[in-house]
Image (cartoon, helix red, strand yellow):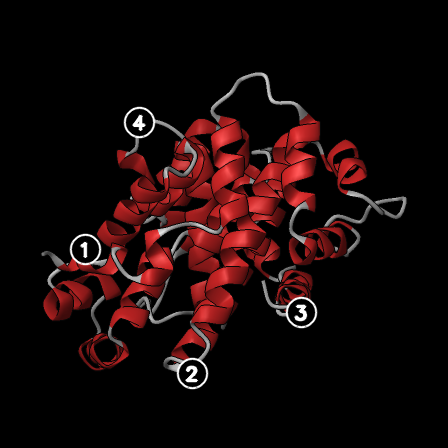
């Protein structure tokens, strides 16, 4: 059995949370009835509570208080809501199941994931691009393969971190050296196994090199650029960046190629506006950590 098969076969990664599985099944139908989505979400009281708290948080700044799942669908839109529910259900499950293992690394992992989601969301809004919340959920889940590796053998992953820090190499190279596989390959296999939507699959499998993708390239580039920003602005997870020229990043060049008007976008000024996103990341983690799911 390969390490990939071994990882996916663990209890945590073998199956998705029941609500996420049911929603993904519904999404296969082009004629989704929002009442079916509402019923599935409402069947889980803890998830419903978290959804309503997130919908009423500064993350979405709703003008009126959202008091029911159906109202959340109307307020946020069906596509956004289903993506938020997927993100919350998956994120919540692994947030708790991973807390006892390598706590220091895990804490950095969740902080980085949350910040990447928030910054990707803000960047998409700033660039006037709308991806139905896939940029936020993709940011939360983009490094799911890294989480799997940490949980599989935290001692081995500490060796990865040591190589990154002492030898000045990137995490991908160090992971290959220690595990014989990297977190991109692991994440891709998990996304396939879970049958995640194409958008999330693209982000998880291609965020390090969005130009190689055939679809969802701009969406993935948004997440990747947010990922890099978080790495260099104190919300890192040992990727190995030393110095970064933001305007020469593959993800930024891809976005500029797709949207020429970005040539005048002040990237440096945007990075100084991240303080609020980091605050929102703390808010999100706080909401998710309440009432274990």
Where does residue 242 sit, x and y in percent of width and height? 33, 70
Q: CA distance from mark 2 to mark 1?
A: 24 Å
* Residue marked by disc 1: 4
Q: Residue at x 68, y 65 (%)?
A: 287
* Residue marked by disc 4: 214
Along the horizontal axis of the image, is 268 left or right of 185?
Answer: right
- Would residue 235 be visible to someone looking at this image? no
Label 3 environment density (alpha carbons within 10 Å; few <14, some 14–19, many ≥20): few
Q: Quadrant of residue 211?
A: top left
Where does residue 46 sit, x and y in percent of width and height? 67, 58
Label 2, secondary structure: give it: helix
Front label number (4 vs 3): 3
Tell me if label 4 and label 3 are in contact, CB under 8 Å.
no
Front label number (4 vs 1): 1
Q: Residue at x 61, y 45 (%)?
A: 84
Whether 243 is drawn above or below 26: the answer is below
The furthest residue to the top: 31
């Amino acid at each position: 059995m390969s390490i990939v098969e071994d990882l996916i076969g663990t209890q945590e990664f073998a199956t998705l949370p029941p609500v996420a599985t049911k929603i993904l099944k519904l999404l296969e139908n082009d004629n989704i009835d929002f009442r079916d989505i509402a019923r599935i979400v409402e069947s889980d009281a803890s998830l419903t509570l978290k959804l309503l708290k997130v919908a009423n948080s500064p993350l979405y700044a709703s003008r009126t208080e959202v008091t029911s799942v159906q109202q959340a669908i109307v307020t946020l839109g069906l596509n956004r809501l289903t993506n938020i529910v997927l993100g919350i259900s998956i994120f919540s499950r692994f947030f708790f199941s991973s807390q006892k293992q390598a706590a220091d690394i895990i804490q950095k992992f969740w902080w980085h994931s949350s910040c990447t989601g928030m910054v990707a969301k803000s960047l998409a809004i700033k660039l006037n691009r709308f991806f139905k919340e896939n940029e936020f959920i993709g940011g939360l889940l983009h490094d799911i393969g890294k989480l799997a590796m940490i949980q599989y053998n935290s001692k081995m992953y500490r060796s990865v971190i040591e190589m990154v820090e002492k030898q000045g190499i990137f995490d991908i190279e160090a992971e290959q050296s220690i595990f014989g596989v990297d977190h991109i390959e692991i994440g891709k296999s998990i996304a396939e196994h879970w049958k995640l939507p194409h958008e999330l699959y693209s982000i998880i499998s291609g965020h390090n090199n969005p130009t190689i993708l055939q679809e969802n390239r701009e969406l993935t580039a948004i997440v990747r650029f947010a990922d890099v920003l978080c790495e260099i602005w104190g919300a890192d997870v040992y990727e190995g960046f030393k110095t970064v020229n933001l305007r020469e990043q593959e993800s930024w060049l891809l976005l500029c190629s797709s949207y020429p008007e970005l040539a005048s976008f002040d990237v440096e000024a945007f990075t100084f506006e991240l303080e609020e996103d980091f605050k929102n990341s703390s808010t999100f983690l706080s909401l998710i950590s309440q009432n274990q799911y």
